Image: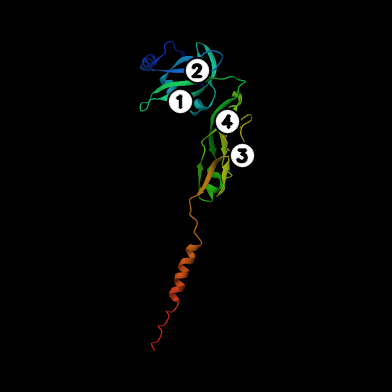
Amino acid sequence: MKFVAFERAKQGTGASRRLRITGRTPGIVYGGTGEPQSIELDHNALWHALKKEAFHASILEMEMDGKSSQVLLRDVQYHPFKQLVLHVDFQKVDANTKLHMKVPLHYVKAEESQAVKFEACVVNHVISELAVTCLPADLPEFIEVDLSGLKKGASLHLADVQLPKGVTAVTHGKKNPVLVSVVSTVAEEAPAADAAPAADAKAAAKPAAKPAAKK
C-alpha cells in the first residue's frame, strides 16, 4: 500500500494540536542512518487506510517530497472517544534486516470440515494473529489456515500449519501453541443417566417386607 506524507517543521504539543485542527495528523519515522524524521499526514486518508488490514501487517510505500521509501506501521494513538488519530509511528525497512511482525491468520473452509458439517461442532479461533520473523521481501500480508480437516475432539496446532517460505514463527516459549479448538454443541449422555431410572423401577417392583409377628 502507498500513502503520502509531508515533512513536519514544527514540533511540540501546541504545534501538534494546531496541526490536528487543520485536518493533519503528526507522525514520526524511525530507523535508517539519520535521526527520526517528523512527518504529517492527511487525517481522513490515514483514517481510511487504518481500517485496512494490509496497512497494519505489510510493508508500506511512503511518498514524500517526490521520493519513495519502505516503512512499517509500528504504533497508532487514538483519541479516547473521538474518531481522531492523534499520532502515528513508522519504521524504515532495511531489505537485509529481518523483521519481527504480527501477521493476521485467515481461517478458511471450516464449514467443509467433518467437525462442522457432520458432527455439530463449533470451531473456536484461539489465536487471530501470529508473531513471525522474516526478511522484508518474505513478509506475508496474512497466513491462510485450512480448517477442512478438522474432526470432533481435535485441535489445530502451529506445527500443523505450513508457513510461507522464509517465515519463522516466534512463540515466546510455547513450542506448539493451539491455534484452533473444536467444541461439540451436543452434550453427550452420561452412562449413569439410564441406570438411575432402572434402579428406581426395580425397587418399586420389589414387595415390601412383612412386619415381624408379636410374641
Circles 1 and 2 in contact, beta carbons < 8 Å? no
Q: Which residue in the protein does label 3 denote?
A: 159
Circle nearer the viewer, 1 or 2: 2
Q: Which residue in the protein does label 1 denote?
A: 50
Q: Which residue in the protein does label 4 denote?
A: 132
The residue closer to the viewer here, 63 or 18, is 18
Q: Earlier in the sequence, mark 1 or mark 2?
A: 2
Q: Earlier in the sequence, mark 1 or mark 3?
A: 1
The residue closer to the viewer here, 27 or 212, is 212
* x then y, percent, for residue 19: 38, 15
Disc 1 to disc 2, C-alpha distance:
17 Å
* Amino acid type assigned to the residue bearing label 2 in the image: Val
Circles 3 and 4 in contact, beta carbons < 8 Å? no
Is 211 above or below relative to 181?
below
Q: Earlier in the sequence, mark 4 or mark 2?
A: 2
* x then y, percent, for residue 87: 43, 21
Q: Earlier in the sequence, mark 2 or mark 3?
A: 2
The residue depicted at 54 percent of the width and 16 percent of the height is 69
SS for callout 4: strand
Question: Horizontally, is 175 left or right of 211 in the view?
Answer: right
Is 185 above or below relative to 1?
below
* Amino acid type assigned to the residue bearing label 4 in the image: Val
Q: Quadrant of residue 93?
A: top right
Q: Which residue in the protein does label 2 denote?
A: 29
